[in-house]
Image (cartoon, rainbow, N blue to C red):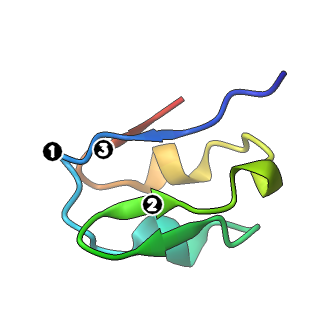
Amino acid sequence: MPAIPKVDESMCTACGICADDCPNACYDIEDVAKLNRPDDCTSCGICVDDCPNGAISM
């Protein structure tokens, strides 16, 4: 089973980079990033690598 990213809401600033960079459009940005489509996530890790605050982990 592939790893699914987790957002640490205390570290997320809702900058939107994860939503912009996700190739499968899995994120919504509200007050914080939300993985709204986990079934579409391919565990590519782009969101983890691109988050400037380190708020996303696998």
- Label ID, residue 25: none
Which residue is drawn at the image coordinates 64% and 35% (left, top)? 4
Tell me which corner region of the image, top left, top right, bottom left or bottom right, holds residue 30: bottom left
Closer to the N terminus: mark 2 or mark 3? Answer: 2
Q: CA distance from mark 2 to mark 1?
A: 13 Å
- Label ID, residue 55: 3
User: On the rendered structure, is 6 left or right of 26?
Assistant: left
* Residue pointed to by mark 2: 34
Closer to the N terminus: mark 3 or mark 1? Answer: 1
Total number of numbered discs in the rendering:
3
* Residue pointed to by mark 1: 10
Residue 52: x and y in percent read 28, 55
Q: CA distance from mark 3 to mark 1?
A: 8 Å
Closer to the N terminus: mark 2 or mark 1? Answer: 1
Please, is residue 42 above or below residue 19 in the view?
Answer: above
Residue type at tag 2: Lys
